Amino acid sequence: MASSLHGIWRFLHWGPLTALGIIKVITITALYMNSMWWPPNASLGGFIHQCLFLLFSTLTTYNYIMATLTGPGLLPKKWKPKNPKDVDQLQYCTICEGYKAPRSHHCRKCNRCVKKMDHHCPWINHCVGWANHAYFTYFLAFAILGSFQASIILGFAFYRGVHRYWYLTHGQMHLATVQFTMTTIIMTIFATGLAIGVVLALGMLLYIQLKSILKNQTSIEMWIVEKADYRRYCNLDEDDFVYPYDLGWRQNLLQVFSKRLVSKGDGITWPVLEGCDQYTLTREQIAQKAEKRARTKTFRCVHPATGRYLPLFSQGLRVCLSPPCTDEARIRLEPGDVIKVTRFREHWLFGERVVPAIELRNPELKRKGPTRGWFPRRCAIELIQPKHYFYSNSSEQSENEVESLDDRQYNARNVKIMNNATNGVPNTSKETLANGNSKQPTQNGQGKKKK
Ligand SMILES: [Zn+2]
Ligand SMILES: [Zn+2]
């Protein structure tokens, strides 16, 4: 615990402050109303009922604080596997300047590689991963139980409070115990709304977490497995993919919930199924990344994109009515920006803006907001790469070559082409766009749709 205290600054963020605020508002309001509705000093039932509520509230706060302080377990910077030959089977993190251990992923918010990363949770202002998975799951469970009990207390107390006059006039004095003031009536309504919201929202999250723990599969790994199956569905020559960490539900549960409350092992080596090894999943990830690189298309921005989730005024109704159903970031673009697109929807594209060297060198020019995310398809046109892009031996090398072209020259040429175009589709062939080096014509909007 003492070693975790240096993480105390993590509470100075809107997520933990709001979460702790919600827990305390529900607890204090429920305790106050309970003291009138079912006083703990009047009966044994009332005493046990209040003790149970205090226990849920304490355990919620304790597990919440421990989930934040313990953190997910960060992979040491510049981490390398013991056997240098194994590096071929691992991905490299350029930010942490080390290899990503099996099941580790780089979190952009924490800016570190995280052991068995599940997701970054703004409410604990940290990732949920190997070390705090149990604390986080217990927090969800106790918060749901406590909030459920609080909504019952508040609901019954509210009913008694609004019927107080009726009880008094009909000789049922023993029921007229709840007395409202303007403040308590507002607090009761507010806290009831919060408690019901917590039960519903965290109930959904707990269901997802338990499903993931029983399968020993984090939400990121679920996505990798889904892509692995899809790859084999499209390419029957590939060997079947066996997810290596699913040891059966009992063992899977023990992986997260051990007596120490911190998950088993060191978060780097994992027990795997027979026939699999430590790098079964990382090899699949590397293969998926290679496929992703192969289907990446380069686009250039021709109309500015605002980076808004619903760009009604700039893009119109059709774009707003078919948004990608995800909370992933939307990126702001300016004409001339180059974007490496990897996902394609009818009206939206997902990609990463290539940050020009000048912006990297000069912090003042650094543009605000994310560089990776969704943007309206009509803001950009697909760039057809010069001939050497298609025929060079290394796709990495050719990507660099495209990026190093004189940006201004390239931009001016494309804007000119767009000015000659009708409906935003350049009426030129691929040859014009690509310095006359390519073979087949292509138009904007022909991206391969992925599921
Ligand atoms: Zn990293
Ligand atoms: Zn994180």
Image (tube, helix red, strand yellow):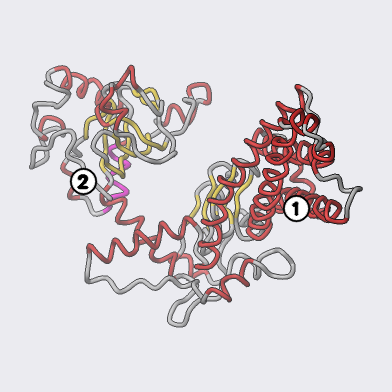
Give the residue type that dot 1 points to: Phe
Q: Which residue is mark 1?
A: 56
Task: Say which quadrant the N terminus sits in.
Answer: bottom right
In the image, is 302 to the left or to the right of 19?
left
First in residue order: circle 2 vs circle 1: 1
Instruction: Please tell me whether residue 78 is drawn above or below residue 309 in the rendered image.
Output: below
Residues packed near mark 2 inside 10 Å, few (<14), some (14 to 19) or many (20 plus):
few
Give the residue drawn at x 80%, y 39%.
Answer: 175
Instruction: Please tell me whether residue 46 is drawn above or below residue 212 in the rendered image.
Output: above
Instruction: Please tell me whether residue 197 is drawn above or below residue 60 in the rendered image.
Output: above
* Number of numbered discs: 2
Q: Secondary structure at mark 2?
A: loop
Q: Could you say where residue 383 lies in the image, as x and y percent from the top left?
A: 21, 34
Whether residue 341 is visible here, answered yes or no, is yes
In the image, is 37 to the left or to the right of 81?
right
Give the residue type that dot 2 points to: Lys
In the image, is 385 to the left or to the right of 275?
left
| The stretch drawn in magenta includes residue 398 | yes
Give the residue drawn at x 71%, y 53%.
Answer: 70
Q: Could you say where residue 180 lies in the image, as x and y percent from the top left?
A: 78, 27
Residues packed near mark 1 inside 10 Å, few (<14), some (14 to 19) or many (20 plus):
many
Q: Which residue appears farthest toward the front when viewing the image?
A: 170
Residue 314: quarter of image? top left
Q: Main secondary structure of the magenta part?
A: helix
Q: Which residues are magenta?
A: 394-402
| The stretch drawn in magenta includes residue 69 | no
Q: Secondary structure at mark 1?
A: helix
**C-alpha gap between disc 2 and disc 1:** 51 Å
Nearer the observer, disc 2 or disc 1?
1
Residue 227: quarter of image? bottom left
- Tell me whether the residue at label 2 lies in contact with that at label 1, contact meaning CB atoms closer than 8 angstroms: no
Q: Which residue is mark 2?
A: 448
